[in-house]
Image (cartoon, grey):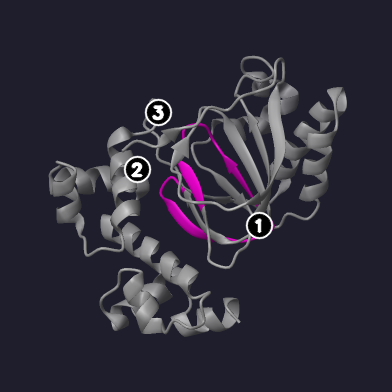
Amino acid sequence: MNPYKEKVIFKDGASFLGFRRRNHKYSFVWHIHPEFEIVFLLKGHGTRYIGNSVMEYDSSELVFIPPGVPHSWVSGDGSGENDAYVVHFDADCFGQDWFCNNELSLVKDLMTSDSAVLIEDCKGAEEIFENLITSRGLKKVAHFFELLHFILESDGKSLGSFRSEEGKVNNKLDRVITYLNDNYKKEINAQMVAEALSMSPYQLRSLFNKYTNKTVLQYINELRVFEACRLMQNEQYTISYLASMAGFNNLSYFNRIFLKVTGMTPREYRKTFCP
């Protein structure tokens, strides 16, 4: 199954779209669109899927997503309603190759990157987003460029991507990612995934490693670990019980993989993030 192709609707004559999405609970909707997207999360926590990246998200983080990179957010248990600012814009919103002008040359790397960017130190971002969505005319445009400047000046981390050389989503890998997200809690391995998707094991390994730089098992384990992190919010679940619910059938293996992915033992993680 391919990702849902979301249609972003701009107001007539608008160069970009900015809005605040309040009181929203995210479920897994694996989707793409040809526009850039900037998301600033004010409230909420859960799991963030961007290309080949699977990570927990928390409040006060900003993510810049290039066109054609599949993504989804999934709210965690007990996270309540999420609150986020969202901005969409086209690559040619101010004319073709506008970001190649001398004054905007620093924007070029951002606009031509295949990888999403995560910014965790977002001090001052809320005011920029609020000004952007409430202002009009030249002031609105000025705040848009202020937002781009904020992203460029921040210490961002590169996140996931999987687009083909032609800049389009790789449909075969897309099917694999979707299948794994639907089935990671079951007892599956690369051989079973390949058979289910009518691929040879070699094709699957080659494709997955090329675009994600991970093995299928690494990706499955990441999905399971972050599901376990989500389940830890329920203090009634024992470590062994939530490990089995997340798809691990061996507790010592779960403990080892959890430490590798998060840098903490499950008990350390629960003590730190799930008081």
Which picture quadrant has residue 143?
Answer: top right
Q: Earlier in the sequence, mark 1 or mark 2?
A: 1
Compared with 189, 86 (above or below) is: above
Which amino acid lies under the numbered mark 2 shown in the image of this protein?
Tyr
Is residue 65 part of the magenta span, yes or no? yes
Q: Residues within 10 Å of mark 2 (few under 14, many from 20)?
A: some
Q: CA distance from mark 3 to mark 2?
A: 12 Å
Range of residues picked out in magenta: 50-73
Camera-side residue of 83 and 176: 83
Q: Residue 223: give x, y in percent of width and height.
A: 38, 61
What kind of element bears circle 1?
Answer: loop
Q: Residue 275: give x, y in percent of width and height.
A: 61, 82
Res 120 label: 1
Residue beneath disc 3: 168
Compared with 71, 104 (above or below) is: above
Q: Residues within 10 Å of mark 1 (few under 14, many from 20)?
A: some
Camera-side residue of 14 and 147: 14
Is residue 120 part of the magenta span, yes or no? no
Res 211 label: 2
Q: Residues within 10 Å of mark 3 (few under 14, many from 20)?
A: few
Which amino acid lies under the numbered mark 1 shown in the image of this protein?
Glu
User: Badges 1 and 2: C-beta atoms under 8 Å apart?
Assistant: no
